[in-house]
Image (tube, rainbow, N blue to C red):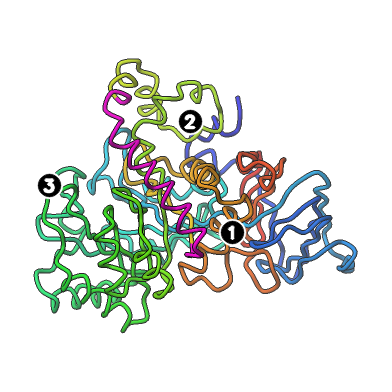
Amino acid sequence: MSVFRQLSLFGLLSLLLISTVRAESNSTIVIDSARLFDGEHVIEQARMVIENDTIIAVGSQQEIALPAQARHLSYANRFIMPGLIAAHSHVGTVSGLQHGGDFYSRETVMRDLAQFQRYGVVAVNALGLNRPLFHELRNEMRGSHHRGADLYGAGAGVGAIDGAPPKGRMGLTEDQAERPATPAAARLAVKQMNDAGIDMVKVWVDGMGGDVPTMPAEIYQAAFEEAHALGLPSAAHIHYLDDAKGVVAAGVNVVAHGVRDTDVDQEFIDLMLAGDVWYVPTININEAEYIYAQHPEWLHDPFFTASLSPELQQQLSDDSWREAALAKSEKNRQSVNYNIKNLTKLHNAGVKIALGTDSGATALRIPGFAEHRELELMVQAGMSTTSVLQAATANAAAMMQLPNRGRLAAGYQADFMVLSADPTFNILASRQIVEVWRYGIQQEKF
């Protein structure tokens, strides 16, 4: 039985059995590898020197001498890269096949962060739908003592009255989104969330196909302005091109989903470039509704099945569920096609791209696996493998304003994956995880 499968079955208890390699106080670790991606470039015959939780040197083995009395680890046939950073995900809201605010707890958040880490994700931006407990967990669930990805996020976020995020459809509790009626109330909501402790402001601007009211422009503009006044980046949930143009014109920093209703035009591209706005396509958000039904053979892949709850694995194995999912997949397929085409255009135009998937929002958006699948989809959009890896590491850290994360370079946190194959040749090699390290500590070994 694979370690992935064991972890899926035994959850957090099995984490206690995983051996760790800890950098002792004032200790030095030297790691050599065949190739290393530093967040921007590939280094051949690489050497990385770590002291405690910080990288002090990265370069070729010819350039960097072995420090005296260092612990030397040789990964002669391995590839090393920064840990993935999930710039748009959710935590603590799923139990089995259900999702909603009633499931949000310390235990479910820890469960999700542990799963993210197993899949090489070292930091997670929980972009809204967080209950008040989030502010306490945000402080606790970071650092070398914490056995899971580091937690960042937007607190509850700012939604529309009787609109997105939809309460009934998502099983939301009242405290999972602030819903201001006026610009003044929007500013107050942002200020209160900032006082409680957040890393980013999330705003939902989406009429859900006309099913619910769209947030008025004066409300979301006030939220963005207050975020900027407080020194916080802002992110907007959108679906449609018109809404995307509106939030970018109003000063948003991050378009937190891809445009999925039509082709983006030059006006939007120009707005994105002029505002230096980040774009997070989250192609997985629509694909997850049908892709597992389309690929039942994935149920024989331990990398995939280790991410599934028993309830979800049972559902995905059910022929009637697969038939129903495929029968109603056309609208989601169209959204995926637009999302991929628009990512191609925006990337080619020079718009900044970061990795995000909306994983953790529903049972089908699977933490950890979704991030690796998104890498594959971004390559399908025509991005090079190195640009995709950069979007998932250095770019995601920059979007989240994390100054010492997402790269393997002097002064950066020692968070990285050891892989048995090279994802710059084939992006699927990102799944060939041998070890995951955080803060200079080996967290997972497969």
Q: Earlier in the sequence, mark 2 or mark 1?
A: 2
Q: Is residue 438 visible?
A: yes
Task: Please give the residue where the numbered disc 2 appears in the rendered image.
Answer: 9
Q: Amino acid at mark 3?
A: Asp
Question: Which is in the foreground here, disc 2 or disc 1?
Answer: 1
Task: Tell whether label 2 touches label 3 (CB within 8 Å).
Answer: no
The structure residue drawn at horizontal position 48% and vertical position 45%, both measured from the top left corner, is: 374
Q: Residue 329, relative to residue 78: is it above or below?
A: above
Number of labelled discs? Answer: 3
Task: Please give the residue where the numbered disc 1 appears in the rendered image.
Answer: 390
Write down the region rendered in magenta.
325-352
Indicate the quadrant containing the C terminus: top left, top right, bottom left or bottom right.
Answer: top right
Q: Main secondary structure of the magenta part?
A: helix
The structure residue drawn at horizontal position 61% and vertical position 58%, both measured from the top left corner, is: 438
Tell me residue 92's x, y (percent).
34, 49
Task: Please give the residue where the numbered disc 3 appears in the rendered image.
Answer: 211
Q: Is residue 115 visible?
A: no
Q: Amino acid at mark 1?
A: Gln
173 left or right of 141? left
Work out how far the residue at label 2 is from the one at label 1, CA to CA, in angstroms.
Answer: 32 Å
The structure residue drawn at horizontal position 29% and vertical position 61%, both measured from the top left corner, is: 244
Give the structural element (helix, strand or loop) at label 1: helix
Q: Residue furthest top?
A: 319
81 and 281: which is toward the camera: 281
183 and 49: which is toward the camera: 183
Q: Residues within 10 Å of mark 2 (few under 14, many from 20)?
A: some
Task: Answer whether residue 347 is magenta in the image.
Answer: yes
43 and 185: which is toward the camera: 43
Tell me residue 96's x, y (percent).
33, 34
Question: Which is in the foreground here, disc 3 or disc 2?
Answer: 3
Give the structural element (helix, strand or loop) at label 2: helix
145 left or right of 91? right
